[in-house]
Amino acid sequence: MSHAPTRFARMKDLPKEHLLGAGTPLCAGCGGLEALHQIVDVMGERTVFVNAAGCMTLLSTYPFTPVGGSWLYTAMASAPAGAQGVRDALDILVAKGKLDATQDLGVITLTGDGSAYGMGLSATSAAIERGLDFLYVVYDNEGYGNTGQQASGATPHFAKTSTSGHGWRGAKKDLFGIWLAHKPAYAATVVGAEPLDLARKVEQAMKRPGPKLLLALAPCPTGWDYDPSETVEIGRLAVQTGIWPLKEWADGELRHTKIPKKREPVEAYLVKQGRFRHLFEPERDERALAEIQARVDAYWEGVAVG
């Protein structure tokens, strides 16, 4: 897997044509849309989106819909079930000769972290167990961004949300690990700020039938409280500090696809976001900052040992 052939060796190999239209109602600087642009460019337009209620629901708002393919909107908890119905219908059409196999469509479930980590987790587990052939794309902005950035199962420890004014006391779930426990066909973490890594992982996912996960960190100017122009930089810092490890699971092997040669301190990432401002003002919370750093260090020590 580590030497899997790819058509995306260099930046100039990335798609030149962008398939998602401009001018959507989404927030400026949306990290989820940044990743989705790149995913669609690699996959092409022969897709059906099954969208769980969330921020990306705005993409289906007439007349601003930027997607060229089909779009099915579902409740927050039921997108995988909707994807099952779409996939079954396409398979039946192909089996009956009413749809040529070369004209088949890829099924993409598009969810935020509120659905992926919480309300839709049971339906997702069942879909993976059934071996559903679909790509499950998560735009993880670490909170219920569409309704005011309430804390979700993806909210990191100490992050301020509209329901945790003094910092979230819970811990971010390991959704990647939950998927691996189901033995999927493929799973990967991505971020829009690393387009080559993202394109290669979309390419690898497309080669494999069965349930596939793309878990995208989605920096959110509105919910994380930073200037929209900083989205790419914050995405890069998430990787460079080691807070967001880029990794993939395929063919029974786990591999980290980008290991920072020298990790930056986590506060370089945290200080740029208003949701962590209370860790720096009116005075530094050294205990909390040390705890976050220690947690990241422990993760990467495990990677080095493994």
Image: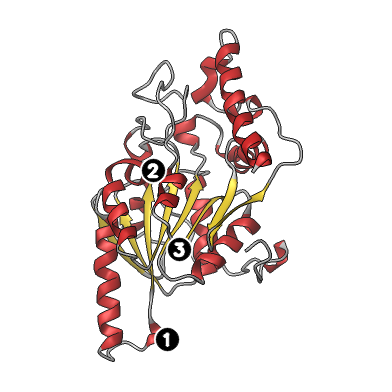
The residue depicted at 56 percent of the width and 20 percent of the height is 291
**Going from the N terminus, do you reach mark 3 or mark 1 first?**
1
On the image, the x and y values in percent for residue 191 come to 56, 48
Q: Nearer the viewer, residue 56 or 229?
A: 56
The number of numbered discs placed on residues in the rendered structure image is 3
Residue 18 shows up from this direction: no
The residue depicted at 42 percent of the width and 57 percent of the height is 183
**Label 3 sits on residue:** 185
Q: Nearer the viewer, residue 127 or 203?
A: 127
**Going from the N terminus, do you reach mark 1 or mark 2 first?**
1
**Label 1 sits on residue:** 102
Q: Amino acid at mark 2?
A: Asp
Q: How is the image coloured?
A: secondary structure
Quadrant position of the N terminus in the picture: bottom right
The residue depicted at 34 percent of the width and 59 percent of the height is 128
On the image, the x and y values in percent for residue 250 come to 53, 61
**Going from the N terminus, do you reach mark 2 or mark 3 first?**
2
The residue depicted at 69 percent of the width and 68 percent of the height is 13
User: Quick one: label 3, few (<14), some, or many (20+) residues within 10 Å?
Assistant: many
Q: Amino acid at mark 1?
A: Thr
User: Quick one: label 2, few (<14), some, or many (20+) residues within 10 Å?
Assistant: many
